[in-house]
Image (cartoon, grey):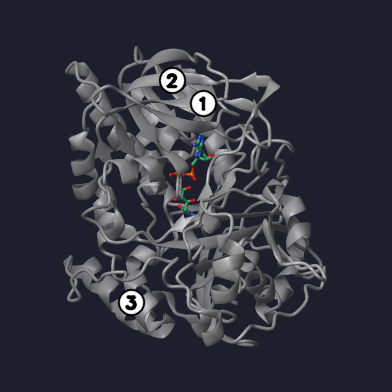
Amino acid sequence: MAEFERESMEYDVVIVGAGPAGLSAAIRLKQIDSELNVVLLEKGSEVGAHILSGAVLDTSGLDALIPDWKAKGAPITVPVTKDDFYLLGSAGKIRIPNFLMPPLMNNHGNYIVSMGNVCRWMAEQAEILGVEIFPGMACSELVYGEDGELKGVVAGEFGKNADGTLSDAYEAGMELHGKYVFLSEGVRGSLTKEVIARYDLDADCDVAKFGLGMKEIWEVDPAKHREGTVMHTAGWPLNSNAGGGSFIYHLDNNQVYVGFVVHLNYANPHLYPYMEFQRFKHHPMVADLLEGGKRVAYGARAITEGGWQSIPKVAFPGGALLGCSAGLVNVPRIKGNHNAMLSGIAAADAAVAAIKDGRSGDDLAAYDADLRSGPIAKDLKRVRNVKPLWSKYGLMVSLVLGGFDMWTNNLFGISILGTLKHGKSDAAATGLAVDYKPIDYPKPDGTLSFDRLTNVSFSMTNHEEGQPVHLQLKDASVPISVNLPKFAEPAQRYCPAGVYEVVREVGKEPRFVINFQNCVHCKTCDIKDPSQNINWTVPQGGDGPNYPNM
Ligand SMILES: Cc1cc2nc3c(=O)[nH]c(=O)nc-3n(C[C@H](O)[C@H](O)[C@H](O)COP(=O)(O)OP(=O)(O)OC[C@H]3O[C@@H](n4cnc5c(N)ncnc54)[C@H](O)[C@@H]3O)c2cc1C
C-alpha cells in the first residue's frame, strides 16, 4: 500500500455513531458548554438510515435531555393505549392478564415511534446547538496516543479495490482527534470490540449475550388497525428450540411494526431464525391482522441481552462506551433507547467536568460510576435474572421465577436469587449438527411470508461493488473444513440477509460464498459463528441499509 499522510482535525469530543446514545451525548455536551467542539460521525448515508428499533419508547431519557421535546416537534405522537402479552400455541393463544405482570413491564405512558425518525429529529436539535454531524463517514480505525490512550478515529476512507489495493479514486479519510472519544456504535460495534480487548474492559463482567431482531413494517387494512396497541408474544413457533418472541406495534397511518427476536444462544445449528419469523406470521392471530395488508419494509439487527451483569467497564483512557456498545438493553422490556440516551447524558456530564478541569485522554471514572449507581443501574438491576433463567430453564420457568424475581425487586428492591450467571457465549452454545434434527420450514407463500432475498430488497440495502469484503474471515478454510462438517455451517441460516452460502456444484468441492452486498449490518455473524472466525468491519461510509421509517 502506498504511504500517505492523513489530514487530522482536533475536537474536544469525537463521537462515533448517531444513534440515540451518540446524539444524546452530543446534545448534552453543547447544552452545557456551547464553546465545545463536538463532532458526530455516522456510517449511514444519513442519520437514521441504519437505525432499527421496535420501537416503544420510554421517554425517561429524552425527558432528561430535552424536557420540552413535545413543544420542539419531536416525532413522538402515538401514546400506547393498549398493552397485551400472549403465550402462543400453534393455533391458539392465552393472554397473561396485565395485573400479573410486574409494573415495570407496563407500557402505558410510553410511545410507539420510528426511532429512525426520532434520531433524525435529534440530529436537527444537535445541529441547532452547533454539533458537526457527518453522515456517510464510517469510522474504520482507532488512533492511539503516545501513552496508549484512545486519541481519535479514522473516518471516511473510500476507494479501496476488492483486493485491498488503492484505486485511482482512493481517499485516505481523516483522523479526528478528541480530548475524549465516545464509542456509541450500538450492538457489537467493530471499534468497540477492539477497545474492549485492548483495555480488557470485560475482565470483571459476565459474558456478553445477544438476540437477533427482525422487523417488517406493514400497512394493514384500516379496519384492523388499532393505533396505540402494543402486543408481545412468546411460545410458538420457537417453543423449546430457542428463547425469543414477537412484538406487534400499531403506529399511525395504518402502519404496524411486526418484529421477532430469537435469542442467539440456541443450540440446534439447523435453526433458521428468519424462517421462524416468517412462520410466526402464519399464526391465526397474526395472519388475521396482516391479511389484506402489504409489507413495506424489512430490516434486522442484533440486540444486546446480557444486561446488568454483562456491562463491561465503560470508561478507559481517552474514551467511553455508550448505549448498546455497553449493552444497556432491558431484556424483558425489550427497551434500550432510554438507557442509550441516559448513558449519553452521563458520559457528556463527565467529559464536560473533566475538560473544565483541564484533563484529557484519561479515564472518565465518574461516567462509569454514574452508570453503575444511577437510573440505568436501577432499570437493569431489577431484571438481571430474567435472561439467565430463560437460557437455563426455558420460557415457562423464566416467566414464573423471573416474574417473581421482578416483583420482589420492584416491591422490595431485593432478589432472592442474587445475580445469576449467563453461562456460555452465544457462539459456544451452538451444538453439533449430528446431535440435532434438521427443522422443516414451510415455504414462504409470498403474501404473508417472503423469501430472504425478496425481503432484503425491502431494506433498500446497497453496497458498492468492487470494495473489499467487509465481512472478514480470520481463516478462509474454516467454513468448509470445520463449520460445515461440525455445525452444518449455520451462517447459511442465522444470517437474516442471505449473505452466506455454501455452493455445491457437481464434481467440485463445496464453496463458501459471502454476498456482502446483502449485509444489513445486524452483526449476527460476528456474534454467532461457532468458530468465531467472522469479523464484521465497516464497509465504505454510506453503504448498508437505507431504512425509511424504522
Ligand atoms: C428488533 C429490535 C427491537 C427493539 N425494540 C426496542 C424498543 O421497542 N424500545 C427500545 O427502547 N429499544 C428497543 N430496541 C433496542 C434499541 O434499538 C437499542 O437499545 C438502541 O438502538 C441503542 O442505541 P445506540 O445509540 O446505543 O445504538 P444504535 O441505535 O444501534 O446506533 C448506533 C449508530 O452508530 C452507527 N455506527 C456504528 N458503528 C459505526 C462506525 N464504526 N462508524 C460510524 N458509525 C457507526 C450505526 O450506523 C448507528 O446509526 C430494539 C432493538 C432491536 C434490534
Q: Residue furthest front?
A: 507
Residue 494 in view, yes or no: no
Q: Which residue is mark 2?
A: 176
Q: Amino acid at mark 2?
A: Leu
Q: Nearer the viewer, mark 3 or mark 1?
A: 1
Q: Is residue 234 left or right of residue 408?
A: right
What's the distance in space between the residues labelled 2 and 3, CA to CA?
44 Å
On whether ligand 1 comes within 8 Å of the CB at mark 2, the answer is: no
Q: Which residue is mark 1?
A: 155
Can you give x and y, in whole percent of width and height, for residue 368 in the image?
Answer: 22, 42
Q: Amino acid at mark 3?
A: Leu
Q: Is residue 13 left or right of residue 412?
A: right
Tell me the SS state at disc 2. Answer: strand
State if disc 2 and disc 1 touch (CB < 8 Å): yes
On whether ligand 1 comes within 8 Å of the CB at mark 1, the answer is: yes
What's the distance in space between the residues labelled 1 and 2, CA to CA?
7 Å
Asked whether 198 or 400 is in front, the reply is 198
Q: Nearer the viewer, mark 2 or mark 3?
A: 2
Q: Which residue is mark 3?
A: 389
At 55% across and 24% down in the image, what residue appears? 134
Q: Residues within 10 Å of mark 3 (few under 14, many from 20)?
A: many
Asked whether 220 or 313 is in front, the reply is 313
At 57% across and 33% down in the image, what residue appears? 47
What's the distance in space between the residues labelled 3 and 1, CA to CA?
41 Å
Can you give x and y, in whole percent of width and height, for residue 7 in the image?
Answer: 49, 12
Q: Is residue 268 left or right of residue 357?
A: right
